Amino acid sequence: MQAADQTLGTPEAQAPGFLTSSVGRKVVMAVTGIILFGFVTVHMLGNTQAYLGKEPFNHYAELLQTMVHGAGIWVFRGVMIAAAGLHGWAALSLSMDNWKARPVGYRAQQMKSATWASRTMRWSGVVLAAFIVYHLLHLTVGSAHPAFIKGNAYHNFVEGFRVPLASAFYIVAQLCLGLHMWHGVWSLTQTLGWVHPRYNKLRRGLASALTLLVVGVNISFPIAVLAGVIK
Ligand code: HEM
């Protein structure tokens, strides 16, 4: 016991554990990033039901709410909250470590040379967090919706996007999602070890294709409603 007490203040005792090491937090970012990315892709595919009309879309929305006798949606929500929380926490704590570790002169130099990518990751992440809060109040809770009808997801979708300002915010948020996803997929492939210059073209191509698909389809929803294609 005494021996254990004596080690408490030593550097060995303070050596970083998995979650406090920067590698550990990068792995957390990568794993939670894959979960969130998977959700956004499946969510986008599910929302394409809106092009099929009211019945298929409402049926799909009802299926989500009632899967596993209504327990499925809560398990899903728990996983999403944990993934988003851990993703944000790891991003914030890695950024804070970077700011603390750099001497002032070096920091100024770094700011100049820091990639546009890494800087946009922070603010696009903040816009996305704000978008998710708004989106939940808009289409799930309904308190930020002009004509919400509980249980009629298609009506909420169409009436929600008929408001130009709401549609504009969705489009801006999807552009931020695009920036975030592009750099996320790029960094993820790096964390996975595809660092050889030979892979750079493949990594760039993969990041661009996935981002264009998700963002392009997501942006099509408000545009289709405003253009009267979905009504
Ligand atoms: C234009 C793009 C999008 C459309 C049209 C859309 C549509 C919808 C709709 C209709 C619902 C409500 C389903 C229901 O209550 O039955 C919903 C829920 C939700 N959406 Fe989206 N969404 C979009 C983009 C996103 C993005 C980019 C994210 C995340 C980054 C996201 C996250 C969520 C979440 C977390 C829920 C709540 C699921 C729940 O717990 O019930 N959505 N979305």
Image: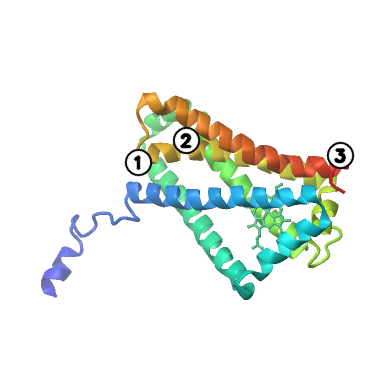
* Residue furthest out toward the left: 3
Residue nearest the viewer, comparing 24 with 113 = 24
x, y percent for residue 99: 41, 41
**Snapshot quadrant of residue 215:** top right
**Residue beneath the point at 85% across and 53% down:** 159
The residues bearing labels 3 and 1 have C-alpha atoms spaced at a distance of 51 Å
| Secondary structure category for the residue under label 2 | helix
Q: Which residue is mark 1?
A: 101
On screen, residue 160 above or below 68:
above
**Residue beneath the point at 18% across and 58% down:** 10
Q: Which residue is mark 3?
A: 227
Mark earlier in primary sequence (2, 1):
1
**Ligand 1 under 8 Å from disc 3 Cβ:** no
Residue nearest the viewer, comparing 2 with 129 = 129
Neighbour tally class for label 3: few under 14, some 14-19, many 20 plus, Cα within 10 Å: few
Q: Tell whether 49 sits left or right of 83.
A: right
Which amino acid type is shown beneath numbered disc 3?
Ala
x, y percent for residue 13: 20, 60
Q: Which mark is residue 224?
A: none
Which amino acid type is shown beneath numbered disc 2?
Trp
Q: Which mark is residue 186?
A: 2
Q: Quadrant of ligand 1?
A: bottom right
Mark earlier in primary sequence (3, 1):
1
